[in-house]
Amino acid sequence: MKDKDQLDIARERVIDAVAQNIELYGVSDSIGRLYGMLLFQENPMTLDEMKEELGMSKTSMSTSVRTLLELKMVDKVWKKGVRKDLYRAEEDWYQTFIDFFTIKWRSAISENVTAMEKSMNELKMLIDNEDTTEEVKIMAKADQERLASAIEYYDWLDRFVDSLESHEIFNLVPKNIENKK
């Protein structure tokens, strides 16, 4: 077996693993193959070059690259004299995780807390209303306690996301063992 063949096999193994596990990021395995392939490229690639390498349609390739850009897993780069857009994989896996996690969780936190706060207000009105039966008031108070606990969780999650964005998390969980104290 030639050295280049061994190199290709080693790379393909990683690309396959990335493609299989990219669903953690909520994207398809074909997008994972694209990201994995870009990881091994020495130079940024155009959509046409990626299309040719992976055998995908230009529309599919464009959609895949846009998804990876939104997830901040791919960067658009500029190169003097090149008129087409060029793309390269973000190589900082820590930052890729942080960006993905924070984008997804900020949205979920906001949506859930907004819904819970609205419900908390409605539950308070039910409890304060003289016409509400005692049975419903008891259930509403129990719901208030559940939601208060959930809102505490989302406050914690929001602070956790802050620790990722600020990189404070690396004080608690260092990037590598040499940094542990």
Image: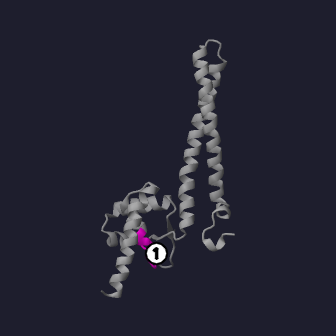
Closer to the camera in the image, 122 or 54: 122
| Residue 46 visible in the snapshot | no
Q: Is residue 44 magenta?
A: yes
**Image x and y of residue 175, in percent:** 60, 68
Q: Identify the residue at image location x=56%, y=41%.
A: 111
Q: Identify the residue at image location x=66%, y=71%.
A: 179
- Image quarter in which the C terminus is found: bottom right
Q: Identify the residue at image location x=62%, y=12%.
A: 131
- Image quarter in which the N terminus is found: bottom left
Would you place residue 2 above or below residue 174 in this image?
below
Quarter residue 8 falls in: bottom left
Please identify the residue farthest to the bottom as the structure is shown.
2
Closer to the camera in the image, 47 or 106: 106
Q: Amino acid at mark 1?
A: Pro
Query: Which element type, helix, strand or loop, lies under badge 1?
Result: loop
Q: Quick check: 103 left or right of 31?
A: right
Quarter residue 165 falls in: bottom right
Q: Identify the residue at image location x=33%, y=69%.
A: 54
**Image x and y of residue 114, in percent:** 60, 37
First to last magenta residue range: 36-45
Would you place residue 130 above or below residue 40 in this image?
above
Residue corresponding to mark 1? 44
Q: Main secondary structure of the magenta part?
A: loop
**Image x and y of residue 78, in percent:** 51, 73
Closer to the camera in the image, 153 or 92: 153
Q: Quick check: 17 left or right of 142?
A: left
